[in-house]
Image (cartoon, rainbow, N blue to C red):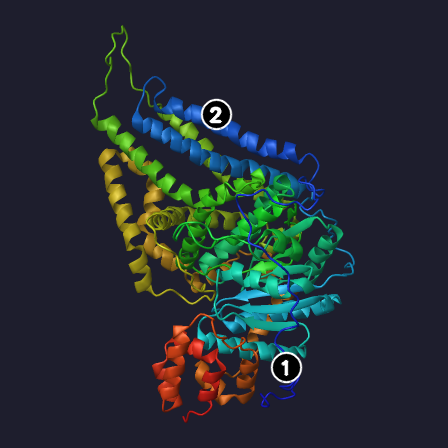
């Protein structure tokens, strides 16, 4: 430890501290079967917008009315005078699916109104003008799991520099909360943390902690911090590994929490930025153009019972500790165990406890990144799918606000609708087959003077289809019209004409991808229902291309399914084949579409053509410029192998030793990886032998023990 020098940010070993003094806060696991204790708070939040019940009635009631009318017209299309099992199935599916798009449509109308009337802030937040003073300490929590440390620190450098410019930086402390299991990434994280302290000259506001056992994943990571340090920080801001937030935004949402003591959480609208591949640029364009409409809509009618997306939000620590201790769900994985999609549940439990949950979509300065390809989204979606399907066990929780239950049902529906669309499509083909090959019963079993003529009205069917597509695409039109009233954002998107062309490009490519995504999500649902757990993998965030062989291996089955489906449709009738062409085309072209959208060259070609532009590209915010500049700062010169890195850098070794958890006490659980790792280190004849002998888990366990470090420094090369 004496090797730690007195360089700025890396103080002498006697005073080195990676963490502040602990300030414990109790956080009990919640009982989902017992009524919550409101602790004197009103169930109706004082920050609830006026007439919010009428807003909810207008949005939900109109969606239900549209669904009823659509179901009636579909009934007339299929056969109003007869009974058909396939017809009944199709009509039930239509009702379920149409309700989904009708609610999105009516919510988008609410968002259109909110955008035109300059809503979306509230809570006393003013985007412009002088910043308020802060009287509260705020913790910025950056949970990380096997992420690239350089990218994580670049975002934190940008946030830190932006906060310094506000003059309110002393109110904020940064915590890097590592759940990293890869020992090589772990030691690189530590080196990057020390470099961040050294470069900023600040060891009073930047802290690092790694958990040896990442119990309950991100929820457990944040919960452990609350129990150890939450008492010193009335507010905490949760970040994601790709999060960047402007200092002014952080000060504004923290001040809003000070002004509104019954608010438990304020969620900002994270804007996707930094994408380079075609897929990522489509995602960020859609998020920038359609996202505000959607977010304003749900904020308008959710009121104080909004939702939480897990990052880029400020949370009242006491509210979180009081209400958001998550229990384990009964049963085995994938439905039992700890809750994967914890954010929805945490918000629901806080609202159940009388705390208001708000979204402020009009407040800019909150950013995140998009996965670079459809393949990466599929990997992430598999985990999200399992987490959302788990919520069926949470929905019956006693005392939940009805909107919180609705949030979870919508989350489930986001994945269940994919297999429903597939079944709807297949039932449509079966009905066409039935109409062609099954002889109709004109008189049936009852005696009647007039025959029963089977009715499938093609004209009415065409109008139902057109109306459905209009309701499905209308939010994009509303978003474009709203954008025409926002000259700054419109200019950042390339102007009215280029924005319209970009919407057409995004809609066309997105429409071709949609049936592929439908099958991917359907496969995810089926695998979860069959008992397969998603695990926990680090998310790829760079724009490295996906090898073509990997794309072929992952997407050939969708091409084959499209060919089989197309052949079946052609066998039934040419008109059915033409009707299904958009779906068939997307499936047949699955491999080239996946390759094209994962291409950085394709994304940059459209950027040069002025398409899919977003203001964050054409008028880059200062905090994103800071993040880009931080990425250009050389990473610490640290060997990739953790053993080599610690062996060759005495200062890093001493800091690593100082950050170790307390040693194992008699009676603590025995860690087999630790025992084997220490034994292999003891028997190794050189550093090279140790590197070859240790598995990643054994290496991590051995480097988390002072005995292992003592042996490491004695090894010859």
Q: Position of residue 154 (x, y in %)?
A: 58, 71
Tell which residue pokes out farthest to the bottom in this image: 716
Q: In what quadrant of the picture does the N terminus appear? A: bottom right
**Secondary structure at numbered mark 1:** loop
Give the left or right position of residue 265, taking residue 707 as reference: right
| Closer-to-camera residue (559/714) | 714
Residue tagged by mark 2? 69
Q: For the image shown, how many numbered marks are present on the structure?
A: 2
How far apart marks 1 and 2 lie (CA) works out to 69 Å
Q: Position of residue 692 (x, y in %)?
A: 35, 83
Q: Position of residue 394 (x, y in %)?
A: 49, 45
Tell which residue pokes out farthest to the front in this image: 667
Mark before the other along the chain sequence, 1 or 2? 1
In which image quadrant can residue 567 be found? top left
| Closer-to-camera residue (482/558) | 558
User: Would you say residue 608 is visible in this rendering?
Assistant: no
Q: Position of residue 39 (x, y in %)?
A: 68, 46
User: Would you say residue 220 is visible in this rendering?
Assistant: yes
> Circle 1: is it few (<14), some (14-19), or many (20+) Cα within 10 Å?
some
Give the left or right position of residue 69, taking residue 438 as reference: right
Vertical placement of residue 144 versus 107, above or below: below
| Closer-to-camera residue (300/669) | 669
> Circle 2: is it few (<14), some (14-19), or many (20+) Cα within 10 Å?
few
Q: In what quadrant of the picture does the C terminus appear? A: bottom left
Residue tagged by mark 1? 16
């Amino acid at each position: 430890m004496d090797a730690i020098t007195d360089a700025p940010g890396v103080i002498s070993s006697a005073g080195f501290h990676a963490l502040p003094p602990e300030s414990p806060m109790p956080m009990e696991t919640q009982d989902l079967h017992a009524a919550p204790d409101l602790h004197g708070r009103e169930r109706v939040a004082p920050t609830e917008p006026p007439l919010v019940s009428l807003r909810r009635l207008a949005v939900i009631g109109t969606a239900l009315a549209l669904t009823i009318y659509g179901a009636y017209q579909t009934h007339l299309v299929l056969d109003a005078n007869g009974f058909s099992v396939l017809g009944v199935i199709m009509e039930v599916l239509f009702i379920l699916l149409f309700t989904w798009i009708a609610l999105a449509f009516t919510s988008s109308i609410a968002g259109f109104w909110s955008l035109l009337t300059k809503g979306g802030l509230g809570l006393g937040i003013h985007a412009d003008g002088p910043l308020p003073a802060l009287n509260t300490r705020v913790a910025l929590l950056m949970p990380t799991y096997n992420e690239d440390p350089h990218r994580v620190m670049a975002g934190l450098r940008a946030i830190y520099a932006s906060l310094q410019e506000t003059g309110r930086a002393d109110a904020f402390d940064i915590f890097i909360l590592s759940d990293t299991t890869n020992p090589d990434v772990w030691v690189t994280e530590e080196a990057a943390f020390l470099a961040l302290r050294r470069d900023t000259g600040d060891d009073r506001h930047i802290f690092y902690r790694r958990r040896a056992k990442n119990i309950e994943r991100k929820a457990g990571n944040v919960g452990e911090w609350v129990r150890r340090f939450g008492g010193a920080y009335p507010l905490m801001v949760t970040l994601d590994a790709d999060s960047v937030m402007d200092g002014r935004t952080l000060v504004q949402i923290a001040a809003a929490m000070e002004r509104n003591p019954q608010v438990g959480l304020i969620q900002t609208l994270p804007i996707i930025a930094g994408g380079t591949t075609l897929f990522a640029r489509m995602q960020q364009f859609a998020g920038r153009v359609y996202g505000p409409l959607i977010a304003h809509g749900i904020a308008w009618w959710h009121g104080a019972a909004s939702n939480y997306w897990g990052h880029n939000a400020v949370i009242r620590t006491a509210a979180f500790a009081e209400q958001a201790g998550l229990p384990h769900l009964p049963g085995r994985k994938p439905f039992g165990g700890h809750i994967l999609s914890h954010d929805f549940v945490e918000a629901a439990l806080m609202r159940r406890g009388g705390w208001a949950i708000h979204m402020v979509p009009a407040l800019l300065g909150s950013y995140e990144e998009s996965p670079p390809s459809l393949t990466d989204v599929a990997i992430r979606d598999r985990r999200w799918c399992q987490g959302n399907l788990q919520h069926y066990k949470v929905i019956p929780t006693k005392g939940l606000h009805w909107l919180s239950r609705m949030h979870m049902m919508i989350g489930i529906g986001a994945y269940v609708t994919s297999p429903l669309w597939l079944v709807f499509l297949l039932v449509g083909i079966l009905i066409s087959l039935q109409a062609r090959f099954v002889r109709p019963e004109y008189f049936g079993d009852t005696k009647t003077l007039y025959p029963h003529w089977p009715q499938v009205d093609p004209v009415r069917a065409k109008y139902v289809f057109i109306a459905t597509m209009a309701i499905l695409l209308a939010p994009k039109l509303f978003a474009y019209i709203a954008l025409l009233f926002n000259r700054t954002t419109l200019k950042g998107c390339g102007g009215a004409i280029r924005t319209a062309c970009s919407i057409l490009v995004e809609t066309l490519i997105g429409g071709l991808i949609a049936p592929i995504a439908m099958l991917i999500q359907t496969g995810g649902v089926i695998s979860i229902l069959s008992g397969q757990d998603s695990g926990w993998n680090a998310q790829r965030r760079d724009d490295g291309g996906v090898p073509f062989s990997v794309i072929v291996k992952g997407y050939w089955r969708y091409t084959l399914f499209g060919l089989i489906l197309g052949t079946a449709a052609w066998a039934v009738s040419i008109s059915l084949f033409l009707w299904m062409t958009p779906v068939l085309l997307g499936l047949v072209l699955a491999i080239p579409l996946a390759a094209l959208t994962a291409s950085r060259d394709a994304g940059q070609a459209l950027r040069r053509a002025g398409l899919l532009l977003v203001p964050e590209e054409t008028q880059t915010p200062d905090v994103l410029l800071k993040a880009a500049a931080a990425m250009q700062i050389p990473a610490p010169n640290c060997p990739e192998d953790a053993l080599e890195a610690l062996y060759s850098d005495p200062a890093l070794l001493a800091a690593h030793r100082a950050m170790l958890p307390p040693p194992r006490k008699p009676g603590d659980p025995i860690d087999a990886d630790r025992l084997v790792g220490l034994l292999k280190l003891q028997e190794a004849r050189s550093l090279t032998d140790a590197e070859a002998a240790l598995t990643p888990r054994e290496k991590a366990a051995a480097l988390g023990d002072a005995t292992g470090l003592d042996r490491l420094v004695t090894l010859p090369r």
